Every structure is written in C-alpha cells, then in structure tokens.
Amino acid sequence: MSRLRIFSESDPSVPLFATTEHPRIAAELADQGIRFESWPLHALPFGASPEQTITAYRPQIDALMQEKGYQAVDVVSLVPDHPDREAMRQKFLNEHTHSEDEVRFFVAGSGLFTLHLGERVFEVLCEAGDLIGVPDGTRHWFDMGPTPHFIAIRVFTNPAGWVASFTGSDIAGRFPRYEAGQAA
C-alpha cells in the first residue's frame, strides 16, 4: 500500500503526518510540486522484456512525454538475488539532485523515495501502479531495500539518462531505511 509520511528534518523518529490514502498523498505532494498518480496495471507475461513493458504502457508514456517534453524511456528491473544489489542500493541512498525531472512508474514491486523539501522530509512509499515525478533540483534519495524487487519505467529529458549531483549532506543516513514488507 502506498504511503506518505512527513517528518521534521531534525526529527526522524516521529512523523508529523502520515497517510495511505492515495488521493491525500497526491494532494500533499502536489502542494510541493511533486507529481504522484496512479496508472492502471497491465497484465504482462512472466519475464516480460523491457520492450514488452514499454509497449503495454505506451499510451500513458506518450502522453507524459508529450506533456513534459521528455525524450527517452527505459525499464529498470531488480530482483532480490541480483549479484550487485547492495552496490546498486548504495548508489541511490545519499541525498542528491538531478538537472532534470526524475520520473518513475512502478510496474511491479516497490521502493521508497524520500524528498528533502525545505525543513521537512517527505517519505513516499511507491508501490505497483504509482507514478512519481520529482522535479529537477529537488533534494532526495531512493531506497530499494536490502532485497530489492521492482520493475520501473523511467522517463528522461536527457537521453543519457540518470545523472546525480550529490549534496554531501548526511541527512539520508538519519532517516529510516526501507525494508520491503515492513513499516519503513
């Protein structure tokens, strides 16, 4: 179940706000300039290729690309027994920004986006069917958990894809990590 928790940046122990109601999550994030919406899930064959996945969601992808001027799309998939899962997890765990929007649609599985907005931290648990759009320049980090399982469609402005600029802040290490199947 998707979830939003909002914390003071100085106190990761007690949320100031929490909800699992999708419309409320979307409204709270929209107030911060973050896109959060649901797309219908499509049945895909087991082991569907990236091309099959993109084809299944082509109308939604094309509408988003036309609306925002995005130029590239790909699919990232990670499973719990991936040999580089820990290195890949570490890559995303520190606070960073991008010079373009970071847009992800979760086809399967889940992941935890954490956004550092002003003096508050917005923790967004994304599940299958969730699309999140984090505007360029937004401080954030992503945790896929120690046993990652997700398939996500990524949409980019820059065809070179995901390029991070790390802030050097240690804030991400002070907030809860994601353990799939448990309260984060």
Image: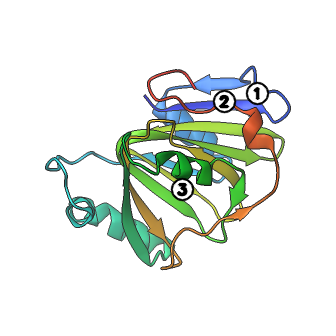
- The reply to whether dot 2 and dot 1 touch (C-beta < 8 Å) is yes
**Percent from the top left, x then y, of residue 143?**
57, 42
Label 1 neighbourhood size at 10 Å, few (<14), some (14-19), many (20+)? some
- The reply to whether dot 3 and dot 2 touch (C-beta < 8 Å) is no
Residue corresponding to mark 2: 176
Q: Which colour scheme is used?
A: rainbow
Which sits earlier in the primary sequence, circle 2 or circle 1? Answer: 1
* Res. 12 mark: 1
Position of 64 compared to 91: left or right? left
Which sits earlier in the primary sequence, circle 3 or circle 2? Answer: 3
Quadrant location of the N terminus?
top left
- The reply to whether dot 3 and dot 1 touch (C-beta < 8 Å) is no
Name the residue rendered at 59%, 47% in the picture: 142
Nearest to the eye among marks 3 and 1: give it: 1
Kind of residue at badge 1: Pro
Name the residue rendered at 32%, 61% in the picture: 60
**Percent from the top left, x then y, of residue 56?**
21, 59
Residue corresponding to mark 3: 133
Name the residue rendered at 63%, 36% in the picture: 123
Badge 2 element: loop
